Image (spheres, rainbow, N blue to C red):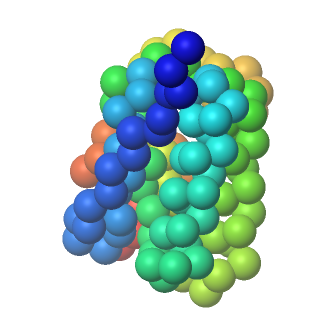
Amino acid sequence: MPKITAKVAESKAGPACVVTFGNPKLVDADVIAEVGKRLTSLLDEKMQRRIVLDFEGVTSVSSAMMGELIRLHAKLKTVPGGKIVLCNFDDRMAKLLKMTKLDKVLTIADDTDAALAKFK
């Protein structure tokens, strides 16, 4: 079986770096590990302090991926000016965030424009 790779793209948009995912399902352990490395690289190597994670097109996220998001959130909280905003969850994913109460921990926006506005 061929290895599944993470498809992560980043672009600078105004006050933040916007990260998009090309994988509709963020559930594979190798993909999650690769996404975690790429996100950590944004902080450690590229010195990005304001990050938007755009989940448009993502239909499934594992608990391990949620753990990566919480880890990134915690790391950014320790950096002056650091913040992460998640956006464009489908209805099912939004319900999952509410059920797990992660919507109280993580900053969530409806879309990319609303996410970018959270940095102003």
User: How many numbered marks have been drawn onto this rendered protein structure?
Assistant: 0
- Foreground residue, 76 or 107? 76
Nearer-the-camera pick, 120 or 70: 70
In the rendered view, does 114 fall on the left or right side of 98?
left
The percent position of residue 109, horizontal first and vertical second, equals: 43, 43
- In front here: 99 or 33? 33
Q: Position of residue 99 (x, y in %)?
A: 72, 21
Q: Residue at 35% of width from left, 65% of height from top?
A: 17
In this view, the residue farthest toward the bottom is 80
| Image location (x, y in percent) of residue 26 | 55, 28
Q: Who's the residue at 54% across and 59% down the image?
A: 39
Quadrant of the image occupied by residue 50:
bottom left
Q: Is residue 94 visible?
A: no
Foreground residue among 88 and 71: 71
Residue placed at 32% from the left, 40% from the top? 111
Is the residue 70 above or below the residue 44 in the image?
above
Residue at coordinates 71% horizontally, 68% vertically from top-left? Answer: 75
Left or right? Give the position of 45 relative to 18.
right
On-image quarter of the C terminus: bottom left
Task: Tell me where residue 14 sits by quadrant.
Answer: bottom left
Relative to residue 19, is residue 34 drawn left or right?
A: right
- Residue 49 as seen in the image, left or right of residue 9: right
Measured as percent of width and height from the top left, residue 105 is found at 71, 48
* Quadrant occupied by the N terminus: top right
Q: Does the image show residue 21? A: yes
